[in-house]
Amino acid sequence: MADLDGIKVEKNYHLDEEFAATGNFHVKGAANLDWGMKKRLTNIFNPKSGNTVMFAFDHGYFMGSVSGLERLDLLIPRLIDHVDVLMATRGALRSSVKPGFRKGVALRVSSGSSMLNDDLSHEVIAVDIEDAIRMDVDCLAVQVFIGAKGQLESIDNLSRVINAGMRYSIPTLGVVAVGKEMERTDQYFKLATRILAELGVSIVKTYYCDKFEEVVAACPVPIVVAGGKKLPEKEALEMAYQSIQGGARGLDMGRNIFQSYHPAEMADAIGKIVHEKFTAKEAWEYYSGAVHS
Ligand code: R5P
């Protein structure tokens, strides 16, 4: 059996060297995928910047109507032009979002718990691949609970979804879940992100942490960073900036956009960092100017 983490040999992430297996495609780790996969990944990652602003509003699948998401039918039309990808459940999309938009879609396909449970790590695959195809989505999002009681079933869910997605050229986005008992350390995120990539996901969603560059370097597919609990806008923009500086290929943000008093302006400011190389300060000035104009 292989050695446990880092006991014998010091690790070297070669932080001064770019990812070497890019081929001529703009998405990390996807050079050897087929045409359909590349088409869908291009609907997610802008070919010019290589990055994406994903807007996550899938919270209702276990939290119900959280603050800011009470009326999807009103919120989404206000935000859709300000982001690149909608990350949502099929129920939210079908019921509340008109289908005639030209943005990427990340469809949440795992579920199984609610805020009423102490342990959220037990999920099932809730969406058939045929329904994802009917909705013409660009990736399938599965929550994975590494180190939790539900680890085995969540890895089983993930593997089944990847296998189904592979049959029809739909990439899978693996979402690293952070439970109460899991620490948000680089060590944990290196473990979880690498496991997901090796299992075959095309995109990993995780959190920003210390030594984030090493997490990115060791993960052979693009990482998008989750927003987490609502922060003051200036801090959220700083976190977004640090994430992109650290090698993230985008943000997959929910509460820090939809719980802002100015969600569209916040999404635009995030987009400036993600696509236009704005610093956190420049993005904050842009945001402040936009909300006071
Ligand atoms: C993970 O559980 C889901 O994708 C969440 O709905 C999403 O990560 C939440 O986004 P945020 O933490 O930015 O509100």
Image: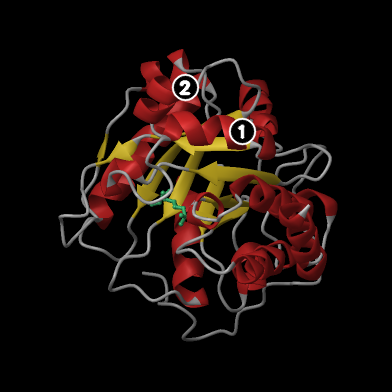
Locate the N terminus by quadrant.
Answer: bottom left
The residue to which callout 2 is attached is 167
Image-based side of 127 in relation to 106, left or right? left
Q: Report x, y in % for residue 81.
A: 67, 33
Figure quadrant of residue 130: top left
Residue 250 visible within the image: no
Task: Return the residue nearer the eye: 38 or 52.
Answer: 52
Task: Return the residue nearer the eye: 110 or 33.
Answer: 110
Task: Return the residue nearer the eye: 197 or 182.
Answer: 182
The residue to which callout 1 is attached is 80
Q: Report x, y in % for residue 45.
A: 69, 39
Residue 269 visible within the image: yes
Residue found at x 51% / y 68%: 190
Figure quadrant of residue 241: bottom right
Q: Which amino acid does label 2 sit on?
A: Arg
User: In front: mark 1 or mark 2?
Assistant: 1
Task: Bin the neighbour count of mark 1 within 10 Å (Cα to Cα): few under 14, some 14-19, many 20 and up.
Answer: some
Q: From what the image shows, is residue 47 above or below residue 283?
A: above
Image-based side of 163 in relation to 157, left or right? right
Q: Report x, y in % for residue 281.
A: 79, 70
Instruction: Pick whichever of labels 1 and 2 is earlier in the sequence.
Output: 1
Task: Bin the neighbour count of mark 2 within 10 Å (Cα to Cα): few under 14, some 14-19, many 20 and up.
Answer: few
Figure quadrant of residue 44: top right
Task: Return the residue nearer the eye: 153 or 114.
Answer: 114
The residue at label 1 has a CB less than 8 Å from ligand 1: no
| Element carrying mark 1 | helix
Residue found at x 56% / y 28%: 138
Residue farthest to the front, as pictured? 293
Image-based side of 21 in relation to 112, left or right? right
Q: Which amino acid does label 1 sit on?
A: Ile
